[in-house]
Image: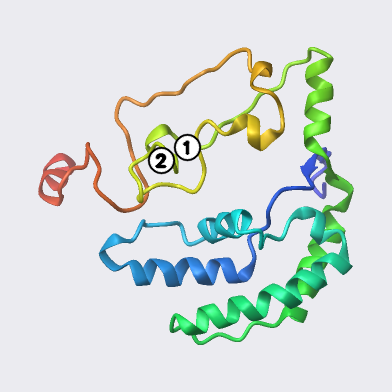
């Protein structure tokens, strides 16, 4: 906006928020896995997904409802602190400090927040075009990929994530690389060993 570009966003009120303790948990879990580490980005994505299905998640709707946010943080943060400390991570988490920071995010985001499923279905009912981008490739999907060296989502989860029926998808465009690449750890079918890789680079 400062550079003169209009910002027109629609942010789902159901989107889950990565919290500071998610990043700490990500680092601890990778350390504890040792040789089985997944090679995550360290951004806290996996622990955020775990809280989503464990029903501990903080969502965008909570950020714009200060009473809800404070109530949840007062419950969740002490539990996360105990878990982290039990795993050898000496941390002190302040629910009040986290509340202050994240409620300020909520104030900035509030004007963009909506029920995006309602918005998308309205647009589809009007027979307008909607472009969905599905995350990752099949080998990285949590269910179909090279588990446990995978991401936390499914490549084909567009409909459940967006809140639209499968019948609304009229065309699928697949992007395929000549060879598969991967960020992270674990066995991989096209992996080059260090000697072969060095020879290729030479």
Circles 2 and 1, Cβ within 8 Å, touching? The answer is: yes
Where is residue 151 shown, x and y percent of the image?
A: 45, 47
Mark sitting on residue 136: 1
- Which of the 4 image quarters holds residue 182? top left
Where is residue 75 shown, x and y percent of the image?
A: 72, 75
Q: Report helix, strand or loop for mark 2.
A: helix
Residue at 61% across, 86% down: 92
Q: Report helix, strand or loop for mark 1.
A: loop
Q: Circle 2 sits on which residue? A: 140
Residue at 29% across, 60% down: 36
Where is residue 43 shown, x and y percent of the image?
A: 53, 60
Q: Is residue 98 left or right of residue 183?
A: right
Residue at 37% across, 36% down: 139
82 relative to 177, above or below: below
Q: Is residue 1 left or right of residue 85?
A: right
Where is residue 38 shown, x and y percent of the image?
A: 36, 56
Q: Nearer the viewer, residue 2 or 152?
A: 152
């Amino acid at each position: 906006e400062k550079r003169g570009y209009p910002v027109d966003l629609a942010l789902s009120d159901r989107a889950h928020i990565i919290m500071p303790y998610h990043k700490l948990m990500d680092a601890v879990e990778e350390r504890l896995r040792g040789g089985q580490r997944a090679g995550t980005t360290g951004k806290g994505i996996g622990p955020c997904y775990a809280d989503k299905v464990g029903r501990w998640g903080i969502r965008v709707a909570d950020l714009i409802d200060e009473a809800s946010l404070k109530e949840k943080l007062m419950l969740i943060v002490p539990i996360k602190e105990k878990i982290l400390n039990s795993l050898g991570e000496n941390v002190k988490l302040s629910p009040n400090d986290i509340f202050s920071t994240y409620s300020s995010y909520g104030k900035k985001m509030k004007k963009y927040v909506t029920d995006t499923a309602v918005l998308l279905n309205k647009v589809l009912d009007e027979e307008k075009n909607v472009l969905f981008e599905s995350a990752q490739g099949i080998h990285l999907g949590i269910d179909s990929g090279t588990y446990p060296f995978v991401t936390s989502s499914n490549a084909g989860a567009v409909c459940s994530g967006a809140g639209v029926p499968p019948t609304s998808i009229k065309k699928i465009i697949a992007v395929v690389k000549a060879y598969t690449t991967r960020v992270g750890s674990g066995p991989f079918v096209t992996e080059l060993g260090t000697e072969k890789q060095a020879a290729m680079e030479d």
